[in-house]
Amino acid sequence: MEQYIMKGGVPLCGEVNVAGAKNAALGILAGAIMTNEPVIIDNVPRVQDIEFLLDAISEIGAVVERRDGNRVLINGSTIRKTMVDNDSIRKIRGGYYLVGALLGKYHHAEVDLPGGCNIGSRPIDQHIKGFRALGADVKIKNGMIIAHSGRLIGTHIYMDMVSVGATINIMLAASLAEGKTIIENAAKEPHVVDVANMLNTMGANIKGAGTDVIRIQGVPALHKCEYSIIPDQIEAGTFMMAAAATRGDVTVKNVIPKHLESISSKLREVGCEIVEDDDAVRVIGCNHMRATHVKTLPYPGFPTDMQPQMSVVLALAEGTSVVTESIFENRYKYVDELIRMGANIKVEGNVAIIDGVPLMTGARVLATDLRAGAAMVIAGLAAEGYTIVDEISHIERGYECLVEKLSGLGANICRAESERDLQKFKMKVG
Ligand code: UD1
């Protein structure tokens, strides 16, 4: 029954702090089990996907201690099994990083196949291709990936497509392989670089992360370290879109502006003013946003994880925008929900044609997946009247304290657990 209820129409104003990057944290926390020494990770976002991964890591016997909110200690010396078949792991996508981590360290891994957002078919053939190239025998049996090897041997791997997950997974396993591994056509996303930096802090020898050729010289063992996760590019982008859609003025803090360039430039095209500081980006909305075209691409292109939020902004921009989704095949399920709020959007294949409307109106809508859910919240904050968002567990997989952060920017929003909470909110907001 948990829902978000909001009354839109208030321009968001003020400052908001961004948490650590969820998708980097998934790779980094899996990597932390690859040594028998304690690893301390800072800036770990408190979101459901991370809790699920930490539960799974703890269920195989590693020590997992939450310290001071966003700091986590992991000690992999007490791991007693290499089979990860608990409920937690089935709910998340990043659980597959335990295959790379366990295979690298113990030469054996059995991990339930990943869940995560339902945004189209999400094969893992490139992960498997990479593990096999390193010398592992890999099969899928009873819903699990089972990977086994003698020694892993470094090799040359050409990725058939740019995959964040496969790049990180191969990097994890190859860190402890014998000899040199070269990954060609690697993903360049900031979280790939972050996982590489963390592994290097643990004693790995990875060069070239952030370019499309990554070279990994295997080392015999990894050691303890302390590491702080980079800010979440997608959470930051979500607040930037919320500022634009509500015609507000928001400074998003604790960010790396370079990671946000594709988002900033699209917002400039629609007419927003963007002011960059060393570790903050300010978005000043404008009353007459203009249409533009967006195509999702691997980094440094426009992120697919920002496509639904950007579409909300374009739904309110004057003129016709064209959005092309080139990464996932089924990422427009939220469009029907936006149409219920008065948006004018047609989807043809992987293209959405958006005719901007001056205003949307509140409705009861579904969060069809994580980022689509964030888009519904942005739409609700911009719309006239009340919006109720159902299925918010999707949103809570990836956003830390979203309601608190938006309230801090002046939004009228609340997390309701009952009809009574909804009524109380309506009485309060009027
Ligand atoms: C990660 C992110 C996700 C983001 C996506 C693209 C995590 C947990 N999730 O997902 O939020 O939307 O990157 O930036 O970090 N593909 C294959 N075979 C494979 C692997 C991928 O065909 O073995 C295809 C996918 O279907 C997709 C494309 O490659 O079309 C990119 O996928 P990938 O970068 O691997 O996404 P994920 O790692 O699943």
Image: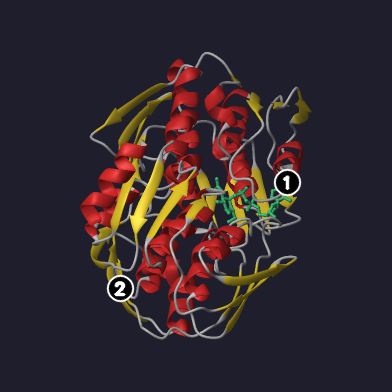
Q: Eyeballing the image, is 398 above or below 88?
A: below
Q: Eyeballing the image, is 274 above or below 168?
A: below
Q: Residue sitting at 49 percent across and 80 percent down?
A: 317
Given residues 372 and 74, the one toward you in this image is 372
Q: Residue sitting at 34 percent across and 41 percent down?
A: 416
Question: Is the CB atom of the residue marked by disc 1 within 8 angstroms of ligand 1's nearest atom?
Answer: yes
Which amino acid type corresponds to the residue marked 2 in the rendered image? Answer: Gly
Going by the picture, which residue comes out furthest to the top?
80
Q: Is residue 122 left or right of residue 189?
A: right
Of helix, strand and loop, which one carries label 2?
A: loop
Q: Is residue 398 left or right of residue 251?
A: right
Residue labelled with disc 2: 248
Question: Image quadrant of residue 133?
Answer: top right
Question: Image quadrant of residue 231?
Answer: bottom left
Q: Is residue 112 visible?
A: yes
Q: Residue sitting at 68 percent across and 65 percent down?
A: 326
The chosen color scheme is secondary structure
Which label sits on residue 178? none
Rendering coords of residue 25 (x, y %): 44, 43
Residue labelled with disc 1: 126
